[in-house]
Image (cartoon, rainbow, N blue to C red):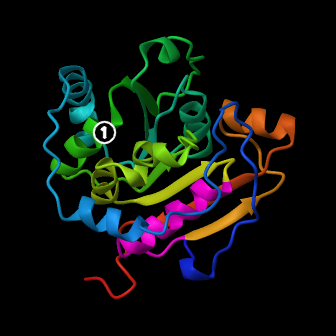
């Protein structure tokens, strides 16, 4: 999983996205992706941090600072199923699940594991606060698909928004999953443009981590995964 390959060698098999929109989904990566990434990386994001996000960060800050366990962040965890599953898979780690929806988090099915917490916060804020505090996650999972499939919605995708800088500044081994091949391919290209290598693959017979992945499997969708070590700057970037 830590073996990285040149993103320019990765091609994903086309996968139509199952959406109900009048406009068809974007069919291929944007040609101006590298320019958009360069703009984000050279600009300061001035959006104020929401009070509830700062409060959530403050609640868990001491626990993270006092812990000697590897830190794993599960961003946009929804109901927290993925956080619970990651805590079971990595019992020696401290796992933080973060989601902005109080409604989704209220549906969390807790387990007896004490090595995880779920927090209500906006990851756009939380990533910046964590990076500013010097947190160094061992792994960062971004399993919510977040495709926004219309071409006009590009800037709502993680790599199309100013949040991308905060994401890569946080570091760690990043794992992204989606059922949309264009989103996966663009994520690889965005990481490439930021100076990081990334590996991409189509998964088969993987045990679902999230409810989304369970749904994909039930309806026969493909599942794609992108992995990048954000602690390793490559591709000629210093």
Q: Examine the structure image and report whether residue 189 is included in the region drawn in magenta.
A: yes
Q: As drawn, is 161 to the left or to the right of 103?
A: left
Q: Examine the structure image and report whether residue 167 is included in the region drawn in magenta.
A: no
Q: Secondary structure at mark 1?
A: helix
Q: Which residues are magenta?
A: 181-198
Q: In the image as oriented, which residue stretches furthest toward the bottom?
A: 236
Task: State the image coordinates of residue 41 (x, y, percent, origin top left).
Answer: 24, 63
Which quadrant, please, contains the C terminus? bottom left
Q: Nearer the viewer, residue 7 or 204?
A: 7
Q: Which residue is mark 1?
A: 124
Residue located at (37% from left, 25% from top): 119
Dot 1: few (<14), some (14–19), or many (≥20) neighbours within 10 Å? Answer: many
Q: Quadrant of residue 54?
A: top left
Task: State the image coordinates of residue 210 (x, y, percent, origin top left).
Answer: 65, 35
Evaluate whether residue 93 shows in this view: no
Evaluate whether residue 11 shows in this view: yes
Q: As drawn, is 20 to the left or to the right of 76?
A: right
Q: In the image as oriented, which residue stretches furthest toward the front?
A: 22
Residue located at (64% from left, 76% from top): 10
Task: State the image coordinates of residue 40 (x, y, percent, origin top left).
Answer: 26, 59
Q: As drawn, is 132 to the left or to the right of 197?
A: left
Task: State the image coordinates of residue 101 (x, y, percent, origin top left).
Answer: 43, 19
Which quadrant, please, contains the N terminus? bottom right
Q: As drawn, is 84 to the left or to the right of 103?
A: right
């Amino acid at each position: 999983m830590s073996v990285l390959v040149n993103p320019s060698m990765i091609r994903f098999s086309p996968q139509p996205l199952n959406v109900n929109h009048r406009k068809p989904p974007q069919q291929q990566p944007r040609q101006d992706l590298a320019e958009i990434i360069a703009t984000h990386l050279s600009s300061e994001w001035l959006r104020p941090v929401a009070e509830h996000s700062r409060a959530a960060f403050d609640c868990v800050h001491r626990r993270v600072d006092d812990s000697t366990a590897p830190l794993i962040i599960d961003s946009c965890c929804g109901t927290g199923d993925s956080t619970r599953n990651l805590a079971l898979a990595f019992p020696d780690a401290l796992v933080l699940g973060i989601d902005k929806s109080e409604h989704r988090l209220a549906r969390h099915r807790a387990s007896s594991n004490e090595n995880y917490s779920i927090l209500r916060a906006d990851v756009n804020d939380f990533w910046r606060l964590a990076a500013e505090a010097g947190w160094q996650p061992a792994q960062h999972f971004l399993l919510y698909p977040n495709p926004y499939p219309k071409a006009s919605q590009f800037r709502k995708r993680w790599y199309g928004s100013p949040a991308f800088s905060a994401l890569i500044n946080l570091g760690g081994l990043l794992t992204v999953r989606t059922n949309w091949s264009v989103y996966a391919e663009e994520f690889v290209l965005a990481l490439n443009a930021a100076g990081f290598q990334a590996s991409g693959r189509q998964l088969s017979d993987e045990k679902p981590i999230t409810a989304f992945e369970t749904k994909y499997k039930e309806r026969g969708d493909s599942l794609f995964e992108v992995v990048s070590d954000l602690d390793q700057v490559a591709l000629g970037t210093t």
